[in-house]
Image (cartoon, helix red, strand yellow):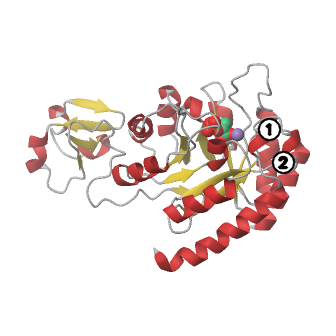
Amino acid sequence: MILIRKNVCETSTNLAQVSIKTIGDYLVFDDHIEAKLHGIEYRKVSDDIRFPLAFRLSGEDTVSVKFGNQTLNSFDPVIIAGPCAAESEEQIWQTGEFLSKLGVTIFRAGCFKPRTDAYSFQGLGLTGLQITKSMCKDKKMLFVSEVTNMSNFDAVCEYADVIQVGSKCMYDVGVLRSLGQLSKPVLLKRHFGATLREFVQAADFILSNGNTNIALCERGIRTFEKDTRFSLDSCGIEWIRKHCRLPIIGDPSHALGETYGIKQLSRGLVAQGIWGLLIETHPRPEDALSDSKQQLNFEQFRNLYTNITKLKTSLKSTW
Ligand code: PEP
Ligand code: MN
């Protein structure tokens, strides 16, 4: 099949009339029109590929994805950090102060938390967004926060610089389509029960509506294993690198669900050539209102950060 952006079709007389269907911002055509496409930008993908926009064509570069003014790249992965959830003004400012002094420029905190237990902490909502935004402004950090459904979509998009789609929201095509209409970058987490194809198909919903600023995030999948929270899918990361043209970030915190191996998993991901890391840290993890067991305290985070910085330097000559 051949995909051409609708606005490109408008410049060529009669082209739109022979399209087979529409996918978001794109018109789809049979391969036989290729001969007529001189000077027209198009994508040609085999019909059985159900993620034609995210699919990496032979020799195609990774899409240039920008978080603020930083373009994600796999030789110098970005570190995104912060607590699982914004809990109080004090906790947000303490964490922001600590991280920005260390050199972290992207702060992440959830304000609407999708919880399995309806009676546990649901996030500070709008107040959390406001507190975190003003801290990030002060520290000149980018703010990443999670949208969980359309009821908080507008609020999160108003305050956050990067919109995270949490694992449980990955299948919400309404949210995905709406994100496609934004120009803000998106961090799309894999559902813990999603196959790799379903994961990249979710990215296609966003791409098909015009937003190409998408980073994927591998955060562990549910397997038969019970002794780790989830299983980090390193093979999946390589499948994505081969078959998908979007960058992928690794989240060892949610995968392992404990603090003890986060540094080692992070080192592995960086050596693997990941585009970024997402790490949870909290001033007092033992008191955290969500994901308490996996959040690093500041000492543990400092140790991880300095270690990863050294590792990145020593890997430089090997890429
Ligand atoms: C989170 O990032 O804090 C979170 C809830 O992660 P996930 O959606 O991957 O479970
Ligand atoms: Mn969390």
* N-term mark: 2 or 1: 2
Picture coordinates of residue 150, whole percent (x, y): 60, 26
Alpha carbons under labels 2 and 1: distance apart: 9 Å
Rendering quarter of residue 255? top right
Secondary structure under the numbered disc 1 in the rendered image? helix
Label of residue 128 in the image: 1
* Number of residue marks: 2
Label of residue 199 in the image: none
Outermost residue on the top side: it is 118
Residue shown at 34%/49% (left/top)?
243
Report crowding for label 1: few under 14, some 14 to 19, many 20 or more residues within 10 A (C-alpha): many
Question: Which kind of residue does numbered mark 2 sit on?
Answer: Ile
Where does label 2 land, which residue? 92
Q: Is disc 2 in contact with disc 1, using a CB cutoff of under 8 Å?
A: yes
Rendering quarter of residue 126? top right
Tell whether 293 sits left or right of 155: right
18 lies above or below 55: above
Work out whether residue 137 or residue 197 is closer to the camera in this orientation and state it.
197
Picture coordinates of residue 65, whole percent (x, y): 49, 56
Picture coordinates of residue 282, whole percent (x, y): 82, 48
Quadrant of ligand 2 in image = top right
Work out whether residue 107 or residue 2 is closer to the camera in this orientation and state it.
107
Residue shown at 88%/40% (left/top)?
287
Work out whether residue 159 or residue 294 is closer to the camera in this orientation and state it.
294
Secondary structure under the numbered disc 2 in the rendered image? helix
Question: Which kind of residue does numbered mark 1 sit on?
Answer: Gly
Q: Quadrant of the C terminus?
A: bottom left
102 lies above or below 92: below
Picture coordinates of residue 89, whole percent (x, y): 89, 44
